Amino acid sequence: MPEEENIRIVAEKAPDYRVITIDGAYTWLNAQAGSIDFFCDVIEPEVDGEGNLSIPEVKRVFLFQIRMTRQFYESLAGYMALNQKNVEEAEKKGEM
């Protein structure tokens, strides 16, 4: 195998890139692949004739799904857990 060369990586946002705020996610994993469905909960309160506020239901709107290999799923989960640990340690030290 030839010696490793330095490969330049050029990162850019896609033309349709956007930030989406989510409230949660459902995940799915099998022996071959994994996916994550992200959702946003929409609360539609109601007010009766006496002015009492109630929330009869919450509408869970699925915004998008990402699919990946099982290996990437596991790597992403590990990466996120490590980041969480690093943030918690920085908070304990008063660095955040």
Image: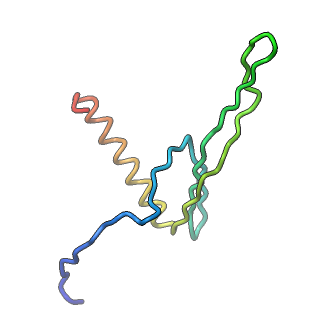
Residue name at image x 56 percent, y 40 percent = 23
**Colouring rule applied to residues:** rainbow
Q: In x, y percent, where is residue 31?
A: 59, 68
Query: Of 65 and 84, which appears nearest the observer?
Result: 65
Q: In x, y percent, where is residue 3?
A: 18, 85
Residue name at image x 77 percent, y 27 percent = 56
Dividing the picture into quadrants, the one containing residue 5 is bottom left
Quadrant housing the C terminus: top left
Residue name at image x 32 percent, y 35 percent = 88
Dividing the picture into quadrants, the one containing residue 52 is top right
In the rendered image, the residue lying farthest to the top is 50
Residue name at image x 57 percent, y 70 percent = 32
Quadrant housing the N terminus: bottom left
Q: In the visual, does 78 lie left or right of 96? A: right
Q: In x, y percent, where is residue 55?
A: 72, 25
Query: Of 51 and 63, which appears nearest the observer?
Result: 51
Query: Is residue 42 placed above or below 52 in the rendered structure?
Result: below
Query: Is residue 65 placed above or below 43 in the rendered structure?
Result: below
